[in-house]
Image: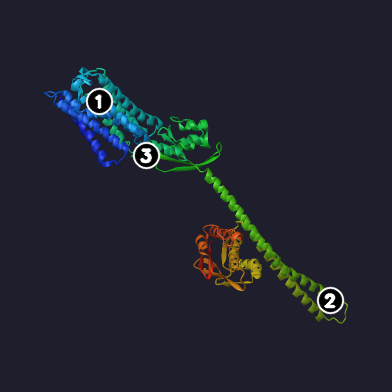
Amino acid sequence: MLYIPYLYCLIFTEVLLLVLLYFISKQKKGQIKVAFSLFIVCLAEWTFCLILQICMQNTSIDPFFFEKLSAFGAFFSPVSFYFLGKIFSQTKIKFKWIYVLPFIIPTCSLILALTNDYHHLFVESYSIRVGETVWGPYFMIHSVYTFILYFIGILYFLKYSIKNSGFFSKQSILIILGTIVPLVINFLGMFGVPMPVYMQPLSFSATVLFYSLAIFKFQFLRATPIALQKIVDRISDSYIVLNDENMIIDFNQTFLNTFHMDNLRNQNIFDVIREHNFLNIEVKILKDVLRKVTTTTKTYRFEKYAESIQKYFIIEINGIVSDKNFLGTLILFKDTTQHMLDMKTIQDKQDMLMEKERLASLGQLIGGIAHNLKTPIMSISGAAEGLHDLITEYDNSIEDPEVTAVDHHDIAKDMSVWVEKIKEYTEYMSDVITAVKGQAVTLSDEQAVSFTIEELVKRVDILMRHELKNALINLKVTLQTEATTELKGNVNSLVQVINNMISNSIQAYNGQTNKNIYFEITKEDNQVIFTIKDEAGGLPKEVEEKLFKEMITTKGKNGTGLGLFMSYSNIRAHFNGNITFETKRGEGTAFHIRIPINA
């Protein structure tokens, strides 16, 4: 029956060699791969020598000779396992001279085993059956030390398993189970339990089985346990991992610190929600989402505000799937508090800048009102004075026999002329007031109405007349489409955009007089194009690159940069249109406002 243990040992050795070849050919270099490969080499050497012992036990060769041959693998496998556990738990270790110490006793054991015939310190009487062997005084030191190394190695794996009781912990648990089996066999053999010597290496078949599962199913040696744990503990986002029964099996330190909780491992997520009520998550909705992620790779996302800790979160829920098997659920809590605060700050500043720009526009309008209303008021005052004189003349002529009917008709005709002039002036004043009122509320008025190009040009003329006259700049209006063409949108907003561009062109002339600004209106396909063009030398390169992308100004402290930025936003938002520009250094700049007719 010797062929049975021989066959077992042979198969076991071949499996060890296959595993070793796999790591040599497939795995990248690294400390944990080297330690594991050395451990496999030690087991393979030990088992191979015992195969020779089984084959040669009926020969004249001393069986202890093969025990000496296997001494290297048998004595140094505990050391390699110790370093394997240490590296696995710490990802990587830095060489220190103290790491030479674990090799001292195995080296002494190797020397004493090889020279045992001279002192019998290791074995006094050797038998192929472990229980019949009489061990020497040194053997107890060697055995205790071996158990200590294996025990420390197991502690390293066990420490990692407890700390990371999740998916990756299955690796270390398999390694621990694979190591305990041969330790038990060795322990029984040391205390005299009868068994053949080849039971020790055969017990390592369980080790190979568990190790192979850890390698091929759970990708043992590809994980970086401590490095990974430190990374997830330091990231600013919190997370928890649930198993398929919605029990919390993993989380990072950020989660505990953020929500001020203690260890939640192995607690049901719904019990935690009911007890702590964090984020006011509705259990019914969460149950539905957790059910859905078991069958889909879709990410479910929603926002929550934690009033108790005054933080905003985006919660993302994903299923954890490996080889089409659902393993659990990852719930990620992205802290967006700073982002929300920054957005509020930006919004406040933008509102402040918009108010500043609005007030600046109102200041220009108020300055224009005085001019636009002064002329018609003075004209109305003159007309009233003329009417007063005609009324006096008419009153005096009633009883004057020399005044004929023709004279009365002439007086009436002159009075009609003055009335028509007053009517004209009042209509103009009404237009000014309407235009000014519209621009005064343009930032808050979102009403979209239909208006004609003619009405738009009229408002631009009224509101820009004063500024153009003061700057001694001519506005050349060219209409190349029907004046009655209707557009739909916020007319006040469009007037402000055009006026802003005309004002920019006036300022671009930098005080030069008798210059022209061209306001051209054309039609192309289903779009009306408003072009404001000047001959003021073009835009600087740095302004050209940032135009419409951010708030930039060429006016120094006198400008906010909001005008064109707001203009672009208004055209996009209110008219579904676009603004483009062309500029040439030394010549000028043209802005093109494109608005769909059916906007």
Label 3 sits on a secondary structure element that is strand
Question: Mark 1: few, some, or many residues within 10 Å (few <14, many ≥20)?
Answer: many
- The residue carrying mark 3 is 321
Residue 79 image point, x, y percent: 29, 30
* 134, above or below 574, in the image: above
Label 1 is placed on what type of residue? Ser
Q: Which mark is residue 143?
A: none
Residue 159 image point, x, y percent: 38, 29
Label 3 is placed on what type of residue? Val
Would you identify the image quadrant in which residue 244 lies? top left
* Label 3 close to label 1 by CB (< 8 Å): no
Q: Which mark is residue 393?
A: 2
Residue 90 visible in the displayed image: yes
Q: Nearer the viewer, mark 3 or mark 1?
A: 1
* 356, above or below 526, in the image: above
Would you identify the image quadrant in which residue 144 lies? top left
* Residue 66 as seen in the image, left or right of residue 568: left
Label 2 sits on a secondary structure element that is helix
CA distance separating discs 3 and 1:
49 Å
Which of the two labelled residues, at mark 3 and mark 1, occupies the earlier sequence position? 1
- The residue carrying mark 1 is 109
Quadrant where the C terminus lies? bottom right
Residue 251 image point, x, y percent: 44, 35
Residue 264 image point, x, y percent: 46, 31
Which of the two labelled residues, at mark 2 and mark 1, occupies the earlier sequence position? 1
* Residue 59 as seen in the image, left or right of residue 281: left
Label 2 is placed on what type of residue? Glu
Q: Nearer the viewer, mark 2 or mark 1?
A: 1
Question: Mark 2: few, some, or many residues within 10 Å (few <14, many ≥20)?
Answer: few
CA distance separating discs 2 and 1:
142 Å
Would you identify the image quadrant in which residue 7 lies? top left
Which of the two labelled residues, at mark 2 and mark 3, occupies the earlier sequence position? 3
